[in-house]
Structure formats: C-alpha cells, structure tokens
Amino acid sequence: MREEDIETAIKVVIVGNGAVGKSSMIQRFCKGIFTKEYKKTIGVDFLERQITVNGEDVRLMLWDTAGQEEFDAITKAYYRGAQACVLTFSTVDRNSFDAIEKWKKKVEAECGYVPSVLVQNKMDLVEQSVVNKEEAEALAKRLKLRLYRTSVKENLHVDEVFRYLSDKYMLLMNSCVDDGQMQRIGGPNVFTTGNGIDNRNGNEKHQTIQLHPNKRRTQGKKSVIGKCSLL
C-alpha cells in the first residue's frame, strides 16, 4: 500500500440552535453556494469535501444536525464518533448564544473531548446584533475555544473555520505518537502521559489516549478515519 493512497477522514458535527446558518455553512464550504431560503433540517444532513492540510489529504465529513429539541433523540446518535465540532450561534439570535454551553455538553456527553471551535455567524447583520463583541469573546475564553466571526452569505471566514479544525485535529493525532512524554501501554495504539497533579491525593494524574484507525475505501483510495480521544 503506497503512502500516497492514504488519506485521513475527519467526522465533524456542526451544532447549535435552529436557523443559525449551519446548513448554509456546509453548503458554502462544500459547494460554494448560498441561498436565503431557510429549510429546517430534519434530523441530520451530510456533505463532504477534501482539502490539503500541511501536504496531507484530509476528507472532511460534515454532519449538520437539527437544532430543534424534538430531534434530540435522533441527532445525538450522530454525535458518536465525531472527531471535531463546530459550535454555532447567530449574532441576531440571543437564545442561540445562550444555548452554546448546552450544545457543548451534549456533544461531550457522546464524544468526550474533541477539537472544537466557536462560530458567531451572520456578521453581515452586525448592525442588528444582540450579542456584543465582549460577550462573545468572554464565552470563547471561558470555554477555551477559538472564536470565528463568520458571514456565510458573504463567505467570510467560512473556510478558515474548517481548516483550523482540520489542522488542530492533525496536530492532536500527531501528538499522540510524537509527544516524548507518552509511554506505550497495553497495545500498539494505546498510550499514557502524565498530566499534572491530581488534587485529591497529590499523585500524578495520567490520561489514556487511544488511536482507533478504521480503514475504508473511498473513490479508489484507502481512507483512514483516525480517532484520538482523551479518556
């Protein structure tokens, strides 16, 4: 198997309240189109796009999930196995901003830690904003996430959101095997690393990191879907 026949596939979930622009965002990123017509997502929608990150082929599998609570039972099943997350709110919808922490907890309940990013969409309507700059920045700081202010309509910073997530995921994957502090335990894909002090007993606390590569054939190429999770 040639090295050039390997690509990395990353499952990305886009979450947030309804009508914040999730479907429009992946349409813009994957197809380069924008439509003003709003159509509520029923359950989930899916698109994909291949990009290059630091010379490596990366296939982004983007799952757009419904923002309405009545679809929770359906959508949470699609969070499982996600390797990255886009938390989205609209600058003209205060409720969507207030719900971000709830969405983050929903994803973490199914996936644990995954690289994530906070997106403030509809910046073309900034004059009507109900979320000020300082509030958005404070939320990003509290959640320890990078904040992108986007306009899907104007194609502002949309590509940067997904390229940042791809780069962050690849760095995490590489760190699983390149970090000099890591020790191999159990099997070829299981590592442990010291991670500071456990305040309960003063002992060094360790995190276990597992790599779960799943191979599948995609358009004539062999694709590796890597998962590096902090357990």
Image: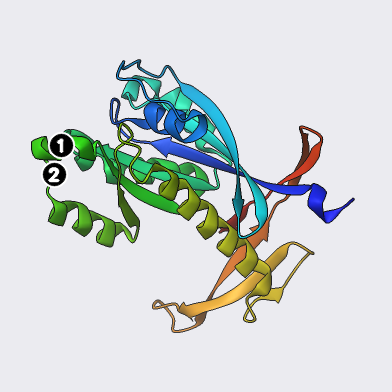
Q: Residue at x 81, y 34 (%)?
A: 220
Label 1–label 2 contact, CB within 8 A:
yes
Circle nearer the N terminus (1, 2): 1
Image x and y of residue 95, in percent:
18, 34
Of all residues, the one furthest to the right in this rendering is: 1
Viewer-proximal residue, 118 or 180? Answer: 118
Left or right: 177 as drawn, with respect to 146: right
Q: Is residue 181 above or below residue 9?
A: below
Residue behind mark 1: 94
Q: CA distance from mark 1 to mark 2?
A: 6 Å
Image quadrant of residue 230?
bottom right
Going by the numbered disc 2, the residue's amino acid type is Val
Disc 1 residue crowd, few under 14, some 14–19, many 20+, Cα 10 Å: few
Q: Which residue is mark 2?
A: 131
**Identity of the residue drawn at 14% across and 56% down:** 134
Q: Give coordinates of residue 102: x percent, y percent.
A: 30, 42
